[in-house]
Amino acid sequence: MAKVCQVAIEYAFKELDLNRIMANYMPVNTRSADLLNRLGFSQEGLARKYLKINGVWEDHVLTSKLNPENS
C-alpha cells in the first residue's frame, strides 16, 4: 500500500501541481495512522462525528501533506 500511495502522491504533486493532499482516518485505525505517518503526513486535528458509517457518527483524525516544491 505504501508504494501505491507514494506513486499517487508524486503524481498529485508533480503532474497535477497540487499544493496540499489531505487524508483522514478513524482513530481506532492504527494501520492507517502508521502508513500516513510513514508517508510524511502531519496530523492537523480531530473532526468529531465526521462521517456516518453503518448508522454511527464516527470521529476522524485529519492529516495533510504539503507539496515540498511549493514551499
Image (spheres, rainbow, N blue to C red):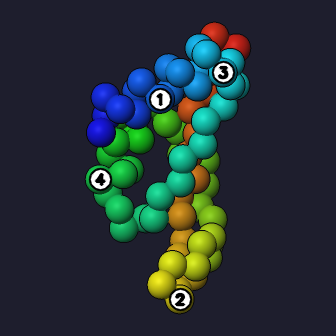
Q: Amino acid at mark 3?
A: Leu
**Nearest to N terminus: mark 1 or mark 2:** 1
Mark 4 to mark 3 CA distance (whole Å): 28 Å
| Identity, as a three-letter code, of the amino acid under mark 1 | Ala
Residue marked by disc 2: 55
Res. 39 visible in picture? no
Q: Helix, strand or loop at disc 3?
A: loop
Instruction: Please tell me which residue is depicted at 63% across the width and 10% down the height of the picture.
Output: 69
User: Distance between the Cα atoms at labels 1 and 2?
Assistant: 31 Å
Picture coordinates of residue 14 (x, y %)?
59, 14
Q: Which mark is residue 16?
A: 3
Whichever of labels 4 and 3 marks the residue nearer the N terminus, that label is: 3
> Disc 3, disc 2: CB below 8 Å?
no
Disc 4 or disc 3, which is closer to the eye? 3
Query: Mark 4: which secondary structure?
Result: helix
Q: Nearer the viewer, mark 2 or mark 4?
A: 2
Dividing the image into 4 quarters, which one contains the N terminus?
top left
Q: Amino acid at mark 4?
A: Arg
Give the residue drawn at x 42%, y 24%: 7
Q: Nearer the viewer, mark 1 or mark 4?
A: 1
Relative to 4, residue 27 above or below: below
Q: CA distance from mark 1 to mark 4?
A: 19 Å
